[in-house]
Image: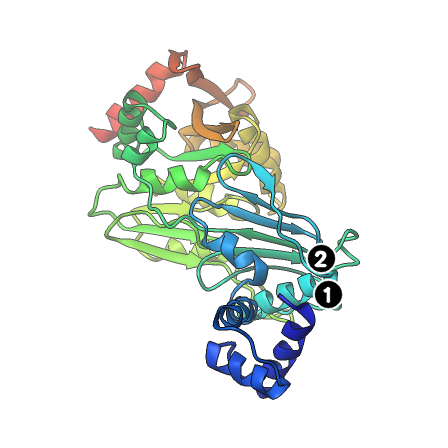
Amino acid sequence: MNQALASRVRNRLIASNVMASRAHVLQALREEGVVLSEESAEELALVLEREFNGAGVLQPLLEEQGVTDVLVNGPNAVWCDRGLGLELTGIAFTSDNEVRRLAQRLASTAGRRLDDAAPMVDAQLRDGTRLHCVLSPISTGGTTISLRIPSAKTFTIESLIAAGSIDEEIADLLTSMIDGRLAFLISGGTGTGKTTVLSALLALVNPAHRIVIVEDSSELNPTHPHVVRMQARNANVEGQGSITLRDLVRTSLRMRPDRIVVGEVRGPEVVELLTALNTGHEGGCGTVHANSPQSVPARLAALGLTAGIEREALHALIGSGLDAVIHLARVNGRRFLDSIHIFDVDEKGFATTRSALTRCGDSWIKESGFTELVSRCESRRA
């Protein structure tokens, strides 16, 4: 396609303040004195429509089934994840200015400002896609755009079994944990499927129970008849109007929840969640970034420090409020449940984890914490 012609048509559409529809593109071409074949006119209209109303050259990737992430590292490096890890695509922008314009337009559709005075943005688009942008020269290699695409598919425990993430034995154990109202966290690194697994487990909750979900960016969408979802909000350009996860967890306590769910525990809201789990709100859960189950107590304690809570106090809340941690892993694009640990308290009063189940190839090793985990499930279900 003639880039110079596309630029002239683009400028006419902008000046006329009209949509990039086929009729308006043909009108702009006539005003330019250019006649194109029907096929070429359709191609130009499609390109400009995606640029004006979609994600430009990235739109085909966003519409491709199975794509979970699209990453732009400047004008000449566009990566995507189709479920097997990041791969470089053949897509390229004409210049960093084109990347910058797309980033600013996507940010504006989310009601956020992105310019030299505010060169970074973290937002959510109308379709649920998570957007993160950093303008150059803050991003020294060119403007970056990161898009995390929500799954159109709602996962269930059966689909996790079909995908090989768990087997039927583990599914029964997880179901017992939900029925027994154990408080748990799902841990793992980026892209291991924490949100997917949590959504599937929440679908197992008693239909009569009221689930209140608080998230920084709305992603959880469990198949359950009674779900209340709340999303945090960043401050506006004047620095006003911020609603934090901590605010939302506090609010959830007054909403008659049977289960309080924090999409991702990542800051001072850990104190409110653990306090709730220690004051009669059984069955709460959430996710946390951690490299291993053993590192979860230290991770939570570090988050507690952001709320001004001493390490000893946080460990006391962890030990008495949480029952288990479900750890996920990803190897060669395959996501799977790697282990389940229970929370213990050592002789010094610090929270630790003890392995209950560990994956070994396609089988499971039952370890010292397994009997205790089953006991907690049975006693609370009774």
| Mark 2 touches mark 1? (CB < 8 Å) | no
How would you rate the neighbour count of disc 1 (Cα within 10 Å): few for under 14, some for 14-19, many for 20 or more?
some
Residue at figure coordinates x 53%, y 27% from the top left: 332
Amino acid carrying mark 2 in the image: Thr
Label 2 to label 1: alpha-carbon separation: 8 Å
Residue 39 percent location from the top left of the image: 49, 68
Residue 258 percent location from the top left of the image: 29, 47
Residue at figure coordinates x 31%, y 29% from the top left: 161
Marker count (numbered):
2
Q: Which mark is residue 143?
A: 2
Residue 209 percent location from the top left of the image: 24, 47
How would you rate the neighbour count of disc 2 (Cα within 10 Å): few for under 14, some for 14-19, many for 20 or more?
many
Q: From the image, tell me which residue sits under label 1.
A: 97
Closer to the eye: label 2 or 1: 1
Q: Say which quadrant the C terminus sits in.
A: top left
Amino acid carrying mark 1 in the image: Asn
In this picture, residue 289 sits left or right of residue 176: right
Q: What kind of element bears circle 1?
A: helix
> Would residue 216 be seen by someone viewing this image from the given angle?
no
